[in-house]
């Protein structure tokens, strides 16, 4: 059975780190990448292609695609629909994310 933690009255699973733009963020088992990032206090997930305007989580159900990020080297991954996993590498997406493809 997974170790459960009580945080602000809510039971949470095991903790682990994901890497966001080179910095470690604390994540809890079962959380999406978007939830981990928002819980850290950060709002910026990507910048638009033409104007470089900031975008964040909007619908949080995978419909709007505003939360696209580069996750483990793949661009255009919806952070609100992707569960965080230990050691996951997440980067802010710039435009369509081509520059982040290895």
Image: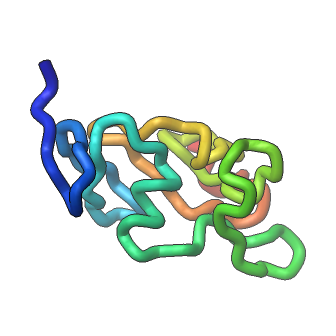
Q: Using the rendered view, name the quadrant where residue 39 is placed.
A: bottom left
Looking at the picture, how far across and down is residue 6, in whole percent?
Answer: 15, 50
Seen at 60% across and 65% down, the residue is 45
Specify the quadrant that holds the C terminus.
top right
Q: Is residue 6 left or right of residue 54?
A: left
Looking at the picture, how far across and down is residue 21, in whole percent?
Answer: 42, 64
The number of discs equals 0
Q: Is residue 100 left or right of residue 61?
A: left
Q: Is residue 83 above or below residue 90?
A: above
In this rendered view, identify the residue nearer to me: 90 or 27: 27
Seen at 56% across and 63% down, the residue is 92
Q: Is residue 55 above or below residue 67?
A: below
Q: Is residue 51 left or right of residue 92?
A: right
Q: Using the rendered view, name the quadrant where residue 56 is placed.
A: bottom right
Q: Using the rendered view, name the quadrant where residue 62 is placed.
A: top right
Looking at the picture, how far across and down is residue 83, in whole percent?
Answer: 46, 36
The residue most toward the top is 1
Looking at the picture, how far across and down is residue 70, in whole percent?
Answer: 58, 50
């Amino acid at each position: 059975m997974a170790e459960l933690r009580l945080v602000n009255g809510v039971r949470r699973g095991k903790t682990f780190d994901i890497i966001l733009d080179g910095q470690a963020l604390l994540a809890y088992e079962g959380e999406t990448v978007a939830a981990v990032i928002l819980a850290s206090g950060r709002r910026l997930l990507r910048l638009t292609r033409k104007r470089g305007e900031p975008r964040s989580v909007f619908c949080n159900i995978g419909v709007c695609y505003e939360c696209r990020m580069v996750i483990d080297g793949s661009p255009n991954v919806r952070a609100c629909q992707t569960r965080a996993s230990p050691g996951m590498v997440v980067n802010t997406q710039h435009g369509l994310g081509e520059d982040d493809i290895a």
